[in-house]
Image (spheres, rainbow, N blue to C red):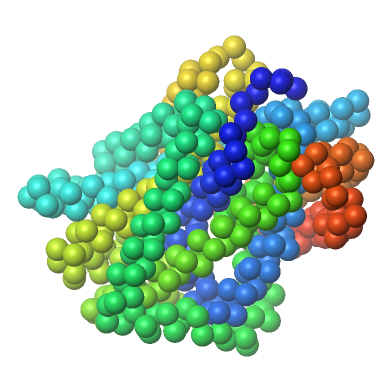
């Protein structure tokens, strides 16, 4: 444990950095259509509940372990089992987390690069560079490699500047901007023809769809990805929180913000889809479901922007700038995981570690790009569908069964002296020890 470890400078700094990590592509391209197809307003309620019932408790596990150990995930898990023969297993689990965080970044940087190139396309169009404009939005390896590199370089530049001067500073700048742009777009889209229909589909509750266990389990899975759990990101961010802060409170704020921005994104995406429908754009897939994820972002919405002429250029630029911001505040939290490990294990400076880790991960991205059909989907499934829940379960089991409960309590009491008599402390320890692992097994089971 080093006393000179850099910390977030304030509560707000942590909240914005952690919310920046949590709010990412998943919130914007996944959540709104998932909600609209699964019971609208009723789904929103269930999602809110699930975020607080499953994701929040696991977020707390990561924050408590991280702040206690003030170290990378590998050393943090080992430290909480100090003196026990099982300690090396903790290091192995932490190492697995670092690997998965790096692999998630390897595909996330590709998608982030697409966001940046799509944001530049309207600019090229305004400058009458039509060939460049179409090159920017056409799938090709030269474009993909260039923009993955640009996106990775942005990520490295921020992480290299440190916890306060890089991660906190840029999250504090970009998160308000993200919320501002989102509000601006929502207000504009709601004035267009067809928007109200989209809102109705999004919000009118249909409780008959809620009972499906399949639905609940898939919502749990996305809450997990959305809160950046299971890869050590939140453990690392936790390790930079000041001792005087109440962890349960901070975790609650971050969970609330993540859900709130996902719900807000629905106020943009769903009306936009129905505005697109009113202009003749196809918004349903062959099986009748709403088009979602990358096809939504790179096909449906650009088709809508095209119908809007000049306004479409502005809206397209603002939208892809928003997506780029959402992606970069998440990617820095992924890169910080291997970088923190490298700084703490070697003599390298933060700058060197950031460039080295970024370069290695960029090589992995390049391999994925050259074998796109075989690897892109496979890496996403391996990391987000299987590894993240599995690691989350291991963190829970580790805290519940390996770490001393008195030490957990002592860590929580640092910023929340009255915690012992709270409902949180009565429920949470056994809950993460027993209930969370069972639920996660169900999630993994279902995804097979
Ligand atoms: N939460 C991010 C998103 O929704 C993804 C993420 C996963 C970030 C794991 C960090 C670690 O896009």
Figure quadrant of the C terminus: bottom right
Q: Quadrant of residue 215?
A: bottom right
Q: Can residue 12 be seen? A: yes
Q: Is residue 287 visible in the rendered structure shown here?
A: no
- Residue 176 spot, x, y in % from top left: 44, 51
Above-or-below relation of 203 to 47: below
Residue 383 pos. (x, y %): 58, 47
What's the residue at 31%, 46% (across, down)? 116
Q: Going 19% across and 59% down the picture, which residue do you hit?
A: 313
Q: In the picture provided, is 115 more to the left or to the right than 169?
A: left
**Quadrant location, the N terminus:** top right
Q: Is residue 146 left or right of residue 226?
A: left
How many numbered marks have been drawn onto this rendered protein structure? 0
Residues 34 and 172: in front is 172
Q: Position of residue 120 (x, y in %)?
A: 23, 47
In the picture, residue 369 is in which quadrant? top left
At which x and y percent is residue 2? 71, 20
Q: Is residue 366 toward the left or the right of residue 168 in the image?
A: left
Q: Is residue 319 depicted above or below 196 in this figure?
A: above
| Above or below, comparing residue 409 to residue 266 in the picture | above
The residue shown at (69%, 62%) is 52
Q: Residue furthest left?
A: 128
């Amino acid at each position: 444990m080093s006393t000179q470890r850099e910390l977030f400078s304030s509560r707000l700094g942590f909240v914005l950095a952690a919310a920046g990590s949590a709010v990412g592509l998943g919130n914007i391209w996944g959540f709104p259509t998932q909600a609209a197809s699964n019971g609208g307003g009723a789904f929103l309620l269930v999602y809110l509940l699930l975020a607080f019932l499953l994701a929040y408790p696991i977020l707390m596990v990561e924050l408590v372990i991280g702040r206690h150990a003030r170290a990378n995930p590998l050393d943090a898990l080992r430290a909480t089992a100090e003196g026990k023969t099982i300690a090396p297993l903790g290091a192995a689990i932490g190492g697995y987390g670092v690997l998965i965080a790096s692999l998630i970044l390897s595909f996330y940087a590709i998608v982030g690069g697409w966001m940046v190139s799509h944001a530049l396309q309207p600019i090229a169009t305004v400058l009458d560079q039509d060939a460049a404009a179409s090159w920017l939005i056409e799938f090709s390896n030269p474009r993909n490699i260039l923009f993955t590199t640009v996106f990775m370089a942005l990520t490295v530049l921020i992480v290299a500047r440190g916890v306060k001067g890089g991660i906190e500073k840029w999250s504090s700048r970009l998160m308000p901007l993200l919320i501002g742009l989102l509000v601006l777009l929502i207000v504009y889209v709601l004035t267009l023809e067809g928007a109200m229909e989209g809102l109705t589909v999004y919000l009118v509750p249909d409780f008959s769809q809620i009972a499906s266990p399949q639905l609940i389990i898939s919502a749990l899975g996305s809450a997990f990805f959305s809160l950046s759990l299971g890869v050590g990101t939140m453990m690392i961010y936790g390790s930079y929180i000041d001792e005087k802060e109440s962890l349960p409170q901070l975790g609650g704020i971050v969970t609330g913000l993540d859900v709130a921005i996902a719900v807000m994104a629905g106020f943009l995406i769903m009306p936009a889809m129905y505005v697109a429908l009113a202009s003749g754009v196809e918004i349903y897939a062959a099986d009748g479901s709403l088009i979602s994820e990358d096809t939504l972002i790179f096909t449906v919405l650009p088709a809508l922007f095209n119908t809007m002429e000049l306004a479409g250029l502005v809206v397209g630029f603002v939208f892809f700038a928003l997506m780029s911001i959402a992606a970069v505040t998440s990617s820095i939290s992924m890169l910080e995981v291997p970088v923190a490990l490298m700084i703490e294990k070697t003599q390298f400076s933060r700058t060197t570690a950031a460039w080295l880790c970024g370069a290695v991960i960029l090589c992995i991205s390049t391999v994925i790009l050259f074998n796109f059909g075989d690897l892109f989907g496979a890496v996403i499934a391996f990391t987000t569908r299987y590894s993240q829940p599995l690691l989350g379960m291991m963190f829970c089991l580790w805290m519940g069964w390996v770490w001393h409960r008195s030490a957990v309590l002592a860590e929580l009491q640092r910023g929340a002296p009255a915690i012992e008599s709270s409902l949180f402390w009565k429920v949470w320890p056994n809950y993460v020890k027993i209930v969370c692992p069972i639920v996660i097994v169900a999630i993994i089971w279902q995804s097979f």
